[in-house]
Each structure stands twice: as C-alpha cells, then as structure tokens.
Amino acid sequence: MTPPNLATQPPLPAPPFDSTRLWNLAAATCLVLLSGWTLAVDLTHEGHFLFQSAFSSLVLGLFLCAWIIGACSSRVFPKRYVIAGCVLGTLRIAVGWPLVLWMSLEYAYLVLDVALVLLSCCYFFTSKSISAAHTSALKLWQHVVAMTAVAMALSVFFTVTSFFGYAHAFSGLTSGYMRIDAQGINLTERVFEKEGHRIHLIATVHVADAGFYDSLNQRFAQPLQGRRLVLNEGVSDKTHILPKSFTSGATYRKMAEKLGLTEQAASLATPVSRPDYIASWAARGVDFESADIDVGELVPRHQTQLVALLGSMENFSAANLFTLPGGMTALDVEDLLVEGLLKRRNDKLMEHFTTRHTAYAEVFIPWGAAHMPDLNARFLSLGYRQVEEIQRPSIDFWKRFRAQPSVPAAVLR
C-alpha cells in the first residue's frame, strides 16, 4: 500500500483565538502596576499616613471595581484571584483595619501592599496558562449569580471595614477626644487640676445635634465657686483673604441643614453674642473671650495654601479627586494643618491662657477635637493632672429612627 504524500495533505486548521489569556494577562499586568505603585507611594511617604495622597488608592479601587464587574458577567477571570485581590485592596483602602488593632497604621499599609504585590505577581505568571472553559448556559448563569452575591458581600465588607477603619484612625489621631462607633460620634471632655485651678479641655465639632451644644452651655453655667472663663475658638479674617462662604459661616450652615444638625456658631455661647446675652452670663460668673488667631498671623506660605485649599473645597470638581490645588503635595497639606492650623492656633490660645487664667477658678476650652492631643500634652507638661473624663454624644446616627422625646424648656445658651 502506497503511503500518503504528506506534502500534498491540506494544512490543519489553526486553533481558534483564545482571548481568555489576553484578558487575564492584561488584568494581571494592571494589578502588578497598581499594587507596585501603591507600595512605592507608601514606602516613600514621610508624614502621617492619614495625610497621604489617595490618588494611587483611588485608581486601585476603580480597577478592582471594574475587575469584579467583569468577573460577574463572564468566567474569564479566576474567582480565587478576583476575591483575594478585592479583599486585600478593600483592607488597604479601609485604612488597614483590622490590622491596625495589632500594629501601627504604617506597618498595616505595608503588609497589605506586599501581600497585594505577591498576589498580583502570582496571578501574572499563571495568567499565561489560563484558557477558556467550555460551559453551558446554565453553568454560566450559576456563575453570574454566585459572583454577584460575592460582589454584594464585598460591598458590605468594604462598608464595614471602612467605617471601623476610619473610626479607629480618627480616635488615634485625636488621642481619644473623638470616638466613633455604630451609634454615633462621641466627644470627650477631660478636666485637669493644679493648685486649685481647673482646666476643661472640651472637644467640639462645627456641626452636631442641638443637645450637644445645650449640654456644653449648661456645663459653663454650673454653679461653682469662683469665676469661670471660656476661651472660644474662631479664626478671624481682618484682611478678607478667605472665601466669603467660610467667613460668613455659610459652609457649615448648609452642611448642618443638609444633615439635620445644628451649627456650632448659632448654638454655643461665644464672646460675639449680643451684649445682653453676654451680660446675663457675666452675672452668673462666666466670661467669654476669643483666643484664636487672625488668618493674617499665619506665615505667608500657609496663608496662600489655606486660600487655595478652601477655594478648591468651595468650587469642588472631579479634578479635585486627582490633584491638590496650587501645586500642593500631601506633605504641604499636613504641614498646613498641623503646624499652621493646629499648633499655631494652640500657641495663641496658650498665650491667652497664661495671661488670664490666674483670675479664674475654672477655664473652659471648647475647641475642635484635632487641637486636643497637643493641648493635652502642653497642660501635662505644665504640671496639671487629669482628674475627670466625660463622654458626650455629639451626633446620633439613628436619631431619626428613634422616638423623639418631649422638648424640655429652653436651656441657658
């Protein structure tokens, strides 16, 4: 029998193009680049990690969202890599919680960064061998339903970890003067004593439930022996360089209206209240003084940066998510907030305190929670010792769903 002439045989048809490898290779490449970028940003950041630019995290989060949406609609991407990548990315974006319960924020970030890089590298090297799996329409629908359930579970996971992550971060940043839990936001008052004089460091916020400010006003009015001095915060702007919406209070007023809260300037007793109002307080032994700076007292660099930052907040756009105004860096923002808006103002406050406190038995300092760690350290260094701590609810997340109690008689404000 004559063997067939192989040269005359028609060529075998080329195997059909398999796009699965290409899609996975592209996804793996993106994940390697984004996880590596995030790790590089964290390794080179020199300041506090909460003030770090979130651009790399934002892009990583957008990619993970697109990736899991793609995994829900087809079986192209391996579920094990998609789920693991989304979990690690979620923990990284959610300020490292719960790892921050056992280690510093910096180490939590780096641990998650390295884990994400290792996962992305493993995915990249295995993506070349991934091929399309032939499946029936029924199995495809089963996959879609299962992955959609996973995506919904991950969204709940992201919400929970982000809430507790940022709550833990803010509590640490304020040394416990602000504490956030599932019920709401609680603020702390710490009382210090030295040689018969008492100092009240009272953490406040610009908008809160009306009852929070009522409780502070009642605290000032408590019948005590000796006169009481309240040193209020509030940056003035004699040179009119700040946006009008901030100097007029419109920004916080609009925020309070939208959230169903009360603005601090309209509810908390201050030295700019009407004369008869202040006189009624003076008759009860309480004096009010402004102890804050004028914006013109900031160094020129901080003045320029503050105007740029407030301007971007007033005219917010999508571009603000990707860039900082005025060519500022994350370290510039941290320097402005810490050295300019916190420590410089605390310096001014302590100048008022030093010259005025000896004439009073009690001094109340109701300032923002971010000011308190530095002030706390200053009074301890002056020989004051903490004798009391009080927790006050400032914002109740669930008040709209609770039965409203009867409104008591108006309290002294």
Image (spheres, helix red, strand yellow):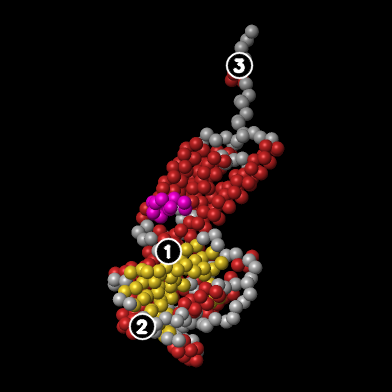
Task: Look at label 3 and name its amino acid.
Answer: Asn
The vertical placement of 136 against 32, above or below, is above
Write down the quadrant of residue 190 in the picture: bottom left
Estimate how packed mark 2 is, as few (under 14), some (14 to 19) or many (20 or more) residues with alpha carbons within 10 Å. Answer: some
Question: Residue tagged by mark 2?
Answer: 360
Mark 3 or 1: in front is 1
Which element is circle 1 on? loop
Residue name at image x 33 percent, y 69 percent? 385
Q: Nearer the viewer, residue 165 or 36?
A: 165
Which SS does the magenta portion mostly show? helix
Q: Is residue 115 visible?
A: yes
Question: Residue tagged by mark 3?
Answer: 5
Question: Residue tagged by mark 1?
Answer: 176
Q: Magenta span covers which residues?
A: 97-109
Mark 1 or 2: in front is 2
Task: Look at label 2 and name its amino acid.
Answer: Tyr
Residue name at image x 47 percent, y 77 percent? 219
